[in-house]
Image: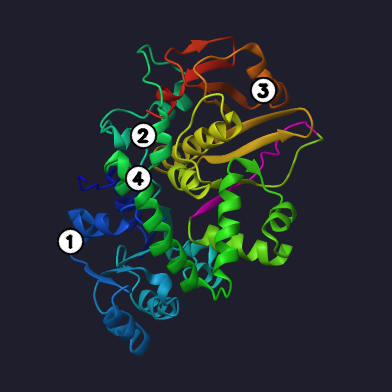
Amino acid sequence: MTEYLPREIVRRLQQALRSLPVVVLSGLRQTGKSTLLQREESLAAGRTYRTLDDFATLAAAQANPESLLTNAAILDEVQRYPELLLALKRAVDEQRRPGRFILSGSANLALLGRVSETLAGRAAYFTLHPMTRREIQGTTSQPSFLAEFIRTQTLASAVAEPVTDMEVLAGGLPPACLGPADAVTEWFRGYVQTYVERDVRQLSQITNLVAFRTLAQLAAMRTAQVLVISRLARDAKLSAATAGRYLDLLEASFLIRRLPPFLKNRSLRLIKSPKLYVTDSGLAAYLAGVDHLEPGRDDLLRGALYETYTAQNLAALLEVHVPDAQLAYWHEQGRHEVDFVIEARRQVFAVEVKAATRWNDGDLAGLRALADRTPACTAAVLAYNGREAVHLDDKLFAIPLGHLLA
């Protein structure tokens, strides 16, 4: 496997380091955080790298945390000993110099209440998402189509290359999507055993790991669906409270994300529960027991995995290229829905994902409804897996996924 350095986020990290004493880079295991922090010269220079995955470093943090903070440092896997953050806060308050510390971890520190409170006003938070399609294809030197479209609503004239089933099944974790295609399933098996179960146990005491893994599998089978915890708990044979706690742990470990509803329009029948996504489509497919996507065999799950793949790409692209944007979904109960709603620069962009290579007028109903009910809606996009982009009317577009994710 070729070594992967996620350079697209480097510019944003550099900017934050020039203004704040602490920068926090979190993300799912194996997205490339440690490699980036050790190999990217602009981040590593002048900073000592230490990881709390190393027993001696963890012991030092527990015995004398100040010893790790005497010089500028990169502290990796800090979720293993959150109490270190109290000593770091004192060090920062004594000498509030920009760029002193970079923290990294495979737990979402912003969701761990005591951590975010400790670093309030002292830290900038970033997420390293799974690799985007443009990173995998090596086209990051070209402008992001999504960012340009949000700015100008200009379509690409070139013919798009459709997203393949294998891309969706491999996802965006570097060892899976850059490694041998015939080794993807085996890699995910080891990944779940080595990282998922270990990380979750580090964050919380779980006495029934089998029940936790069952819930994770059931969640994967519901990726891209509105989350109803009571139903998920029932199917997992758990109490709603236990299921909710397990979901919190999955989210804190970056294994799932909850997409909030878009509520800023005139509709009175909006569903207000979040939508559930597994963070990586390859991981979702593995946990759901899917190793191939045959059109017509299970179109609902195939569509959900394509939507999950689109979600992880959109989240990563917005993080880097449109950082102030917010991502949501829209669902008018019993009537219409739209997979993604992007709020950026006081404008709204709607995106409906279709895994098929063709579309019909019925596929546009949700987009038309949202555009009609949302005065701020600038563009409503049917993202289908074809080759040509079409401007359908004033706000309505059919754009290939291959363009949207480029």
Rounded to the nearest angstrom, the CA distance separating label 4 from label 1 is 35 Å
- Callout 4 environment at 10 Å: few (<14), some (14 to 19), or many (20+)? many
Residue under the image location 30 percent in, 85 percent down: 60
Q: Is residue 278 above or below residue 239?
A: above
Work out how far the residue at label 2 is from the one at label 3, CA to CA, in angstroms.
28 Å
Mark 1 vs mark 3, CA separation in Å: 49 Å
- Work out whether residue 236 or residue 55 is closer to the camera in this orientation and state it: 236
Taking depth in this image into account, of 155 and 340 the one nearest to the observer is 340
Residue beneath disc 3 = 371
Cα separation, mark 4 vs mark 3, equals 40 Å
Region in magenta: 255-267
- Res 370 label: none
Q: Amino acid at mark 3?
A: Ala
Q: Are marks 2 and 3 in contact (CB under 8 Å)?
A: no
Secondary structure beneath label 2: helix
The residue that mark 1 highlights is 45
Q: Earlier in the sequence, mark 1 or mark 2?
A: 1
